[in-house]
Amino acid sequence: MRIVNEHLNPSQAALVAPSGTGYLLLAAEVDRRPMFLPGSRAKTRLIREAKTVTAELERLPEVVRATVFRGFAHLVFGENHRLLRRAVAADGLRPARYDVVILVEVTTPAMIDTLRTHAHYRRLTHLVEAGARRTFEVAAANPRNMGDVDATRQGVFLFNFFYGQEEKELVPVWEYTAGWWAVNTGLDNSRVLQPLPGEPRDYGIINHCRWDRLRDVAPKMIFRPSFRRFVLANFAANDISAQPALYRLA
């Protein structure tokens, strides 16, 4: 890992033990219009039907929770556009432009295969595939944890889809820069989702976290120079690009 502008690092992140749970993430690109515009009828229908199925999934003993998120902001200023263009051309990377994300947490990663064969989950994947222009599914574990992401109440939720030319650098660089978020935005929760062996690796890690209000995070990313000089600079130094988007509970 290459470190730049070390003097701008405000603090190391306060990590807790990994959750030990497993995750199935279903992401869908439904509308062509920007996320901040009203959604189409197709997206409204998909979300309504997906929430019905996730409520059924939550009754299963192996499911901790199943949550549907609706995107409202794609944070283009957090991306390394040059690196992503190269990755699209050379590696066929699919940029993360997902306006609906469904996250299913299970008791252990070992339960993921069992859940994938369940009729409720098969119904959910069919709904998503039938209602979206493009989909992405991945099973993941949690190697780094800043605290549980509270999905029982409304807030501003981040899903940050990371691309890195050297995938092994993603978790160390995330951990090194995580303290900036705690100090500058008051972040006290975050879970890193890392694909399990054999899963798609379009995004080497996906970071998920929550703030109470939009003003807790967006102005800090836009107006604090240290976001660019420390967070984005360390991503760039290690050939990493974030692909962040903000969501609400659907």
Image (cartoon, rainbow, N blue to C red):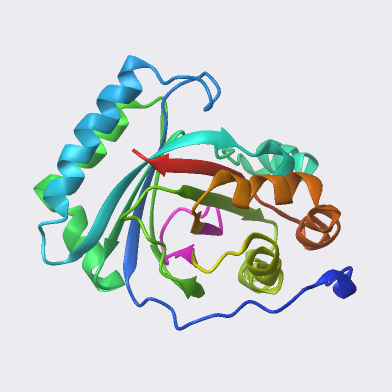
Identify which residue is drawn at 85% across, 69% down: 8
Q: Nearer the viewer, residue 17 or 131?
A: 17
Identify which residue is drawn at 16% across, 42% down: 53
> Seen in the image, is 98 located left or right of residue 140?
right
Q: Which stretch appears magenta? A: 192-207
Image quadrant where one finds the N terminus: bottom right
Residue 113 at what x, y percent from top left? 23, 62
Q: Nearer the viewer, residue 55 or 166?
A: 55
Residue 36 at what x, y percent from top left? 53, 26
> Seen in the image, is 13 located left or right of residue 38?
right
Residue 194 shown in magenta: yes
Residue 26 shown in magenta: no
Relative vertical location of residue 186 with respect to residue 32 in this rendering, above or below: below
Residue 102 in view here: yes
Q: Residue furthest top?
A: 41
Image quadrant where one finds the C terminus: top left
